[in-house]
Image (tube, rainbow, N blue to C red):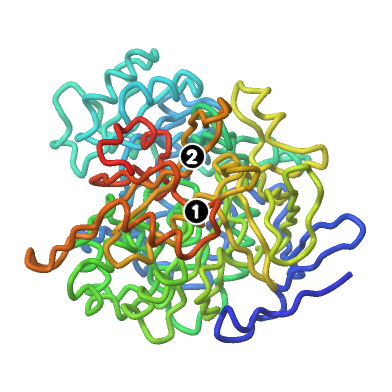
Amino acid sequence: MAVATGHVAATGGSHKQCNALLVAEVDKIWRSESVVKIPTGPTADILSYAFACLGQYDEDKPIFVDALNASNTFSAREARATVRKLIAGLKAHGLQEGDCVWLHAFNTIWYPLIWLAVIGAGGIIFGTNPSAPRSELLHNLGTTRPKLLVTEVASLNVAEQVAASCGIADDQVFVLAKTSQSVPAGRLSFLKLLSHGECGWDVSTGHENLLASRIAAYCTTSGTTGLPKAAKIPHSYVVAQAAMIEQRLKSRPYQPSQLVCLPVFHAFAAQLGLVQPLRLGITTYFLPRFDLDNFIESVRTYQITDAAIVPPIVTALLRRPHADTGLKSLRYVLCAGAPITAELQAKLYQFLHPDATVGQVWGATELGWVTMFAPGEKDQSGSIGTLLANVELKLEDVDGRRICTDLVHGEALVRSPCFFSDYLDNPEASASAFDDDGFYRTGDRVYVEGDQLYIDGRIKETMKVNGWQVSPTELENVLLQHPSIADAAVVGIYAINQDGLEVTRPRAYVVQRLPESSAARSELTAEDVASFLASRLVSYKRLTGGVVFVAAIPRNSTGKILRRLLLAKTPDDTS
């Protein structure tokens, strides 16, 4: 068994060897040398885990804070009492074990309390994006079949229509508002659930494997292919994930405070906003959603040390004049959703505290976080991190052969203690998500160097050009080095060649960078773009499918490029 050494050149310093990758010569599986004990037993449910450390820090300090109005807070003591009241209210309102509660809201300091209370009452929480169109909500609710809705005033109109279509009665709709007076006439205030005394949360009694089968939440995901599905998230997933992340966060040489601007109904932000604040006593400021001015002002006002972001936020910060003057307190910035280049990473470092860490996180809804960097591990290479404890990784080439050599690309398959249970009412997709050894097929193209992982696009997105595999991500990273290109995406288009055969040709969609003054405007042409890339890559990676100039690259909320939407665009300016 060979131990990989720390990758000094890529990080600017040696890594702690507890995160070194191990390769077993027999099974060719990459493993972290680090191991963390996952809580087990009849009280290792989500709520017992989250509230277990209340006596180890000041229970009366603010834990959840409204970043837009810092007078709105919950301490840990208040959070625990409020969760117990909500559990009593939900049960008094008829919530039964296994009932689904639909939470349709942006971030709020109430969100973690509702999330915990539904789970503590034996229900299954299902959070959705208030910006989602009606058709998407109908599809998701048709699968999850919620019995009760909690939503905000601003989202009430669409949510009520969808709820009625899905059989949710009016008396099962609660409006989340600051006061009962702000709830529309004829609608139930969520605050009414607080008037039924207190009730403890349900814990598993008997066999501890119940925690692996007892579902706490539904999370929407497309998996690696297909339409959105509902992943069933058990208690064991959340607790294992929290324990694995907690091991990497304990090394901070400063008193942390964090800003949550990403939606906590998404797997990346959920751990940071819902469980870790109570578990570790971290004061957490919530923005309803990302807004550039509010983000910078919140960091400056509250001297935030930690924040989780996605690549579009990175580019927005870098483009904002004088943004660096407000971000100097940031010492730990996590980025996920899509990879960022080493160049972007280097630029962001200039905006932050001198001792800051900009670390990428890689994972999936189905298995949570797989990699990360801990505070103090200063990556400058564009790596997506090192494996979390207890995680196993296989890399396979296109023929299914296992890879156990540095710098060789392959599809990443992962086995972890925090697996999802299955896709709700979709046994075919559930079965195809795993290989025969129980490894989840991520669909991501990954390689290892030293003890660090790097992502190089999606297997399904990889193009075959003249028999060669071409990753769109590689081409995009090169294009983004051009000073006049603000954003770019590459897709493969199909064409018929002179021999009548169908071939794939790389096409670039490019957003031109706006100059600071009209006098400095440069006329970037398709030929300029194609020549720039051709001078840096081998011939089969050239943009033989043309160049299209667009106003913006379509991305989802986590920054992933929506390539199918690009293919629908009319190539008005192709070369």
Q: Residue 231: in sight, yes or no?
A: yes
Q: Secondary structure at mark 2?
A: strand
Crowd band around label 2 with a 10 angstrom C-alpha radius: few (<14), some (14–19), many (20+)? many
Q: Nearer the viewer, residue 239 or 406?
A: 406
Whether residue 345 is situated above or below residue 509 in the rendered picture = below
Indicate the quadrant containing the N terminus: top left, top right, bottom left or bottom right.
bottom right
Q: Residue at x 33, y 58 (%)?
A: 74
Q: Residue at x 21, y 44 (%)?
A: 178
Rounded to the nearest whole Å, what is the CA distance between mark 1 and mark 2? 12 Å
Whether residue 470 is situated above or below residue 524 in the rendered picture = above
Whether residue 61 is situated above or below residue 251 in the rendered picture = above
Q: Earlier in the sequence, mark 1 or mark 2?
A: 1
Whether residue 552 is situated above or below residue 331 in the rendered picture = above
The percent position of residue 41, horizontal first and vertical second, equals 74, 50
The percent position of residue 504, horizontal first and vertical second, equals 53, 37
Residue that badge 2 annotates: 492
Q: Nearer the viewer, residue 476 or 413?
A: 476
Indicate the quadrant containing the C terminus: top left, top right, bottom left or bottom right.
top left
Left of 213 or right of it: where is 351?
left
Q: Kindly identify which numbered label has been placed on residue 494.
A: none
Disc 2 marks a residue whose amino acid type is: Gly
Q: Are marks 1 and 2 in contact (CB under 8 Å)?
A: no
Disc 1 marks a residue whose amino acid type is: Thr
Residue that badge 1 annotates: 473
Q: Secondary structure at mark 1?
A: helix
The percent position of residue 515, horizontal first and vertical second, equals 16, 65
Q: Residue at x 27, y 50 (%)?
A: 288
